[in-house]
Image (cartoon, helix red, strand yellow):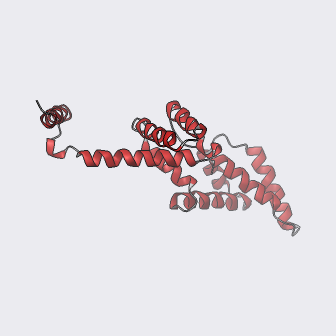
Amino acid sequence: MGRAKARQAAAELAALQNQVTPEEEPSRTQIKKAMEELQHLGAQLVQLKHSDLKKIPMSETLEVAIQEAHRLTQNEAKRRHLQYIGKVMRAEDDVAIRQALAVLDSSTDEHRKAFHQLERWRDGLLANNQDTLQDLLSHHPQTDRQHINALVRLAQKEEKNNKPPTAARKLFKYLRQLSEL
């Protein structure tokens, strides 16, 4: 049996197992393109800083592979290792990784939305809006309520005395740390 017939038989068997017709099976070109996209996604992960890399949902295997990529210096070794990362990426949840990367990328709508949410929380807290505090606590239960209340009181006092809004900036910085933005 030739390779083409064997490949066709394997596709038909897989189609029967998955209840998919052989015509609906992805072509080799489509499969190759998907693998190249995963490899490109892995290359984006390699480019991230260590602190940003912690915010990406990934398995320990992928994390180790990315750390290994930082150690490599030869171009051919890097290229082969990126192919390996692409292979490891097949087992990962690429949608969650893409979303996390989009939030980290300041040019995307996801990042803008998250940033505006932080601004709304800060403004609501400074206006003593209890609904804002409850919304913040529902999204981030690990929030230090006392710290936020102290920063809000300081910011309101600074605003009343026409001083620079350093406490409001600290509050915003704390909110950014909470949301890991």
Q: Is residue 37 left or right of residue 97?
A: left
The residue depicted at 33 percent of the width and 49 percent of the height is: 33
The residue depicted at 68 percent of the width and 48 percent of the height is: 177
Instruction: Tell me residue 108's x, y (percent).
Output: 52, 61
| As drawn, 25 above or below 64 | below
Residues 119 and 22: in front is 22
The residue depicted at 60 percent of the width and 37 percent of the height is: 71
Residue 95 in sight: no
Quadrant containing the N terminus is top left
| As drawn, 152 above or below 38 | below
| As drawn, 99 above or below 15 | below
| As drawn, 86 above or below 114 | above
The residue depicted at 34 percent of the width and 47 percent of the height is: 34
Residues 12 and 32: in front is 32
Instruction: Tell me residue 20's x, y (percent).
Output: 17, 40
Instruction: Tell me residue 48's x, y (percent).
Output: 59, 48
